[in-house]
Amino acid sequence: MNGRNLQYQYKNFLSDFKDWDQKPHACDWLLFSENMGEHLSIDETSLSHGELYTILTNKKAKGKKGSIVAVVQGTKADNIIDILNRIPLKQRNR
């Protein structure tokens, strides 16, 4: 099977990509509030072409599955705070 054909089939038919609730804003930010934990880490990184992203991770997951809490394009505190405020207060207070 052609690799491109497999990728197309997976993206458009096998995965839930079309119904993904974060698809409309995925270029700007991703939020996985279910990964919140007691101890978090925040860092800025450049993924490609000088684009800066801020990444919030759960330290308990030790970089494995469930470690990413948020990925936000840019490093401006106001933008990051706006996104993190979407996490329910009860989870943020943990």
Image (cartoon, grey):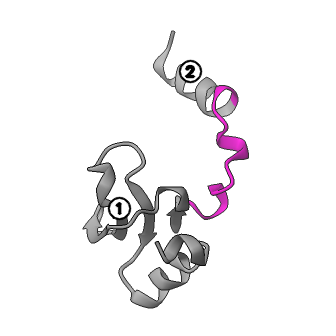
The quadrant holding residue 22 is bottom right
SS assignment at label 2? helix
Question: Between 79 and 62, which is closer to the camera in this rendering?
Answer: 62
- The answer to whether residue 68 is magenta is no
- The answer to whether residue 20 is magenta is yes
SS assignment at label 1? strand
Three-letter residue code for mark 1:
Thr
Residue at the far right in the pictured view: 19
Question: Between 21 and 56, which is closer to the camera in this rendering?
Answer: 56
| Number of numbered discs | 2
- In space, the residues marked 1 and 2 are separated at their CA atoms by 34 Å
The region drawn magenta spans: 13-27
- Expressed as whole percent of the image width and height from the top left, the position of residue 27 reads 52, 62
Which residue sits at x=52%, y=68%? 28
Mark 1 closeness class: few <14, some 14–19, many ≥20 residues within 10 Å: many
Three-letter residue code for mark 2:
Asn
* Residue on which disc 1 sits: 57
* Residue on which disc 2 sits: 5
Q: Is tag 1's residue or tag 2's residue first in the polypeptide sequence?
A: 2
Observer able to see residue 48: no
Q: Is residue 61 above or below residue 33?
A: above
Residue at the far top in the pictured view: 1
The quadrant holding residue 86 is bottom right
Which residue sits at x=35%, y=62%? 57
What is the number of the mark on residue 71?
Answer: none
Mark 2 closeness class: few <14, some 14–19, many ≥20 residues within 10 Å: few
Give left or right: position of 68 versus 33.
left
Question: Between 45 and 58, which is closer to the camera in this rendering?
Answer: 58
Which residue sits at x=36%, y=69%? 53
- Expressed as whole percent of the image width and height from the top left, the position of residue 64 reads 32, 44
The quadrant holding residue 82 is bottom right
- Expressed as whole percent of the image width and height from the top left, the position of residue 50 reads 28, 69
